[in-house]
Structures are given as C-alpha cells and as structure tokens.
Image (spheres, grey):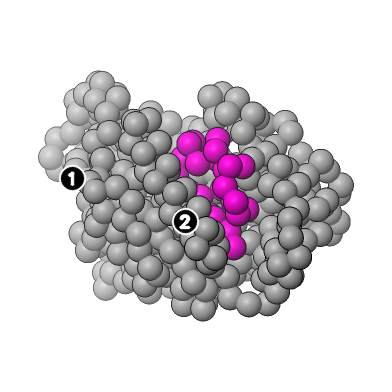
C-alpha cells in the first residue's frame, strides 16, 4: 500500500456556483453593433462555430520535437474540427491538421524564439487574415490565441472576440504585461495554480487544462528501472536535482531535452560535469516514436521543479505512456498527480529519492486512465467551446464577464473528482 506523501488535491467544483459581478473586460464590453450581429451572436449558441486558432510562429504544429504549446494547439485544432466546428489554424510552415491550415510566414524560426520582428510579422499577417474574412462576410466567431505577447496586446483591434490562453507563468515581466493588456481579450488559464498567481485586476474566464491523446502514447510491454527527466534545461525545471536524486537511489537517469539559447551555461556547469554516458546519460532532444518509448520504458518521471509550473505537459505525457510521476508539489503538479494512483508528490530531494521505490507499485493502466479521464482532447475542446460560447453570449458582451474571486478562479474544466487511490 502506498502512503501518499501529501494529501490528495482539493476537490474541484466543475462550474462556479455563482458568477460574481466585475467590471467586464474590453472584449466583453464590445457589444454587438447591428441587429445582424445580435442575431448572429444569439444563434452562435447553437450552431457550429468559425474558430481561428492562432499558434506561435516558431515551431510547426504539431511539433517534431520540443514544443508544448504547439502540441496543445495541434490536438485542440483536430478535436474542435472533429466536433464539427469550422477551424482555421494559423501557424508556422510545416504545420499539419485535420482543420484548415493557413501557414502564415514562409519559414520557421526555431532558433529565434522570442524575436519580436518574427512574432509581430506572424501576428500582423494573421490579423489581416481575420480582418479579410470579416470584410468578405465570413467572419470568425472567435479567435483563440496561443501565440505569445503581440496578439494579446493588439487583441482589442480585431473585429471579433479573442480568447487568449496563458501558457507561461505570471513572473514579474508577465504580470506587468497582463496587468496592462489582460483586459483586451478573455483570458484562459491552464491550471488553477497558474490562475491563482495572476496579477490583480486580471479576470480569468476559464481554466482549461492542456490535452493529451492517450491512444497516441502506447504503454511499454516491459519497463526498465531507470528514471527519466525531460524538458528544457532551465534551472527551475530541476535537471540538476534529478541527477542528485538518481544518485541517491542508485538508479540510472536519462536526461532529454533541448539546450535552448541562454541555457548553455547552466547545462555546462550544472549538468555536463555529471554525465558519464551510462548511469547519468543525456540523450539530446527527442521527438516522435523515440520520445514516446523513452517515456513508456522509464520506471518514473522525475519532476523536481522549483517554480510555479503552469502545467507541465511532460507530466501528462508520462501518464499517457503509463509512467508514474514523482513531482515536487509546486505549481500545477498537485492538479495532475493523484498521489498513490498515478504518482507521488514530494517536498524535497530526499523524499523524492524515497518515493521512487514506491511508485514501482503503481499500475501503468491507472496512470493512463487518469490522463484519459481528465485531459482527453475532446473534453478539453468541449471546455473551450463553452468558453467561446460564453464570449459570444450577448449578455456576456454587454455586461457580465465570468468573474473569478482572486483566491478561487472558476473552472469550466473537465476534470472530474480524482478517483480514489487505487493502491
Ligand atoms: N519535449 C520534446 N522533446 C524534448 C524535450 C521536451 O518533445 O527533448 C516536449 C515535451 O514532450 C513537452 C514539451 O516539450 O511536450 C515541454 O512542455 P512542458 O509543458 O513540460 O514544459 P515547458 O513548456 O515549460 O517547456
């Protein structure tokens, strides 16, 4: 029997019991201007929607290697399309989807992530596409933006409502940015933990977790006893702590991920000296089948994060592959890890080393089930559809936004109550 290291996550309400009154966002205040608009908005509550999904410009959708946002946008585009909506994915070249794809720029910019000239070019052209559609009498009902900064800063210039999903953490820079621009679109967060750290005055319209297609992540016929750490080599992701934990357990550790610009020094000083090609091994950036195998064959994913992780796609990917997660109880980890069922939450490195032995008892099928129950793309798409329709409701546009209390943001989300521990 496994003893959960921390109590199970708090029980979630699926819908806010009440919608407290707040000052509506600028998007919400933009009321339908004509009778045709009003009729269109009302009928949008029932018909399929015309949705523009705006991805970042750097990496194709879906990504071939690193790319959490791109994988989310890819699954969402497919799921909304399957649900019968008319979806246009505005993304970088090389992107593929069951939805219609508009490749906005003519080349990818994987080595220039964050360059303002690229993002502004991408967003400016995407906005032109949205405006052209409106001018031609086929307006989108909603633009769902996942692209970064520029689109949100300009969102109130578009002739259609915008829902913006926050993919990063609300650090100082982001908080200042969202504090000023956050009212220009409806804001969706990807975890309660992320929403709880939003700056004062920012309204959260919905909390919707990221999706995973469990069927695309086959479980391994047999597992190794090695541990896995995977991610970008930013100190807060804790690769150096994973090394110490692996040493303490005597287990092998595989480390995977890109060393992004700016991370070279951390990698050279905190990681490289410990690599021995055997017990502590770096396998580079991985993608596709190799990545799925890496996840599935590991005994556990280590998540020794020391930052308010807004979601952590690698955790749900591990679960989908039947691999339990041992995570520091930071950020969204307590919303993903169900202690004793699909992993354990710990408070430090010693506890993590001890927990590694325990998670071997967990059932890979339960890990997969836990991911399927809460993060299936169709459930995530349905939750976003509710958020889109809320945005289109005339009443919403005129006066009432969904208004979270600061300490408890609403969830339209899809997560059922955690199942009882299986172990
Ligand atoms: N990833 C990948 N190859 C690698 C390392 C990471 O494809 O070598 C993917 C990983 O599978 C996940 C994403 O990059 O889908 C990282 O997303 P996460 O939310 O965990 O972290 P962040 O967005 O903060 O980097």
- Between discs 1 and 2, the one toward the N terminus: 2
Q: Secondary structure at mark 2?
A: helix
Quadrant where the image shows the N terminus: bottom right
**Of residues 384 and 307, the one drawn nearer to the viewer in this rendering:** 384
Relative image position of residue 312 (x, y in whole percent): 46, 48
- Nearer mark to the viewer, of 1 and 2: 2
The magenta segment: 141-164
Which residue is labeled 2 in the image? 132
Could you classify mark 2 by the number of other residues whose Cα lies within 10 Å: few (under 14), some (14-19), or many (20 or more)?
Answer: few
- Residue plotted at (46% across, 40% down): 148
From what the image shows, is residue 124 above or below residue 102? above
Q: Is residue 264 visible?
A: yes
Q: Is residue 148 magenta?
A: yes
Quadrant where the image shows the C terminus: bottom right
Label 2 C-beta lies within 8 Å of the nearest ligand 1 atom: no
**Of residues 100 and 279, the one drawn nearer to the viewer in this rendering:** 100
Left or right of 414 in this view: 402: right
Relative image position of residue 108 (x, y in whole percent): 24, 45
Q: Is residue 72 visible?
A: no
- Residue plotted at (28% across, 69% down): 220
Relative image position of residue 296 (x, y in whole percent): 30, 63
- Residue plotted at (40% across, 36% down): 120
Which residue is labeled 1 in the image? 283
Relative image position of residue 100 (x, y in whole percent): 38, 68
Could you classify mark 1 by the number of other residues whose Cα lies within 10 Å: few (under 14), some (14-19), or many (20 or more)?
Answer: some
Q: Quadrant of residue 8?
A: bottom right
**Of residues 126 and 175, the one drawn nearer to the viewer in this rendering:** 126
Q: Is residue 110 magenta?
A: no
Q: Secondary structure at mark 1?
A: loop
């Amino acid at each position: 029997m496994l003893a959960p290291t921390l109590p199970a996550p708090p029980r979630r309400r699926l819908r806010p019991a009440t919608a407290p009154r707040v000052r509506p966002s600028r998007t919400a205040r933009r009321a339908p201007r004509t009778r045709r608009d009003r009729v269109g908005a009302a009928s949008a509550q029932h018909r399929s929607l015309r949705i523009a999904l705006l991805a970042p410009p750097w990496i194709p959708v879906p990504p071939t290697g690193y790319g959490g946002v791109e994988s989310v946008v890819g699954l969402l585009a497919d799921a909304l399309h399957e649900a019968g909506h008319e979806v246009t994915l505005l993304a970088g070249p090389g992107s593929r989807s069951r939805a219609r794809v508009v490749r906005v720029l003519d080349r990818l910019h994987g080595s220039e992530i964050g360059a303002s000239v690229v993002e502004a070019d991408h967003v400016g052209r995407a906005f032109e596409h949205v405006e052209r559609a409106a001018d031609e009498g086929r307006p989108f009902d909603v633009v769902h933006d996942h692209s970064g900064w520029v689109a949100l800063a300009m969102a109130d210039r578009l002739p259609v409502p915008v829902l913006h999903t926050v993919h990063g953490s609300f650090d100082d820079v982001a908080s200042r940015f969202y504090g000023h621009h956050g009212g220009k679109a409806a804001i969706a967060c990807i975890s309660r933990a992320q929403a709880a750290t939003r700056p004062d005055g920012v309204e959260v319209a919905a909390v919707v977790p990221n999706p995973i297609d469990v069927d695309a992540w086959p479980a391994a016929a047999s597992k190794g006893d090695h541990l896995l750490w995977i991610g970008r080599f930013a100190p807060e992701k804790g690769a150096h702590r994973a090394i110490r934990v692996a040493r303490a357990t005597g287990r092998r550790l595989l480390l995977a991920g890109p060393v992004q610009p700016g991370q070279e020094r951390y990698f050279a000083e905190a990681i490289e000296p410990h690599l021995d090609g055997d017990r502590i091994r770096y396998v580079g950036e991985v993608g596709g089948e190799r990545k799925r195998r890496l996840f599935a064959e590991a005994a556990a994913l280590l998540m020794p994060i020391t930052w308010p992780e807004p979601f952590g796609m690698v955790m749900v990917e591990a679960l989908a592959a039947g691999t339990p997660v041992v995570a520091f109880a930071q950020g969204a980890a307590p919303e993903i890890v169900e202690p004793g069922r699909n992993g354990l939450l710990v408070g430090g490195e010693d506890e993590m080393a001890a927990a590694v032995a325990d998670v071997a008892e967990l059932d890979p099928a339960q890990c997969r089930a836990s991911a399927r129950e809460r993060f299936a793309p169709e459930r995530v798409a349905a939750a976003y559809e509710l958020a889109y329709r809320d945005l289109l409701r005339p009443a919403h546009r005129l006066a009432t936004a969904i208004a979270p209390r600061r300490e408890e943001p609403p969830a339209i989300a899809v997560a059922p109550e955690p199942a009882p521990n299986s172990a």
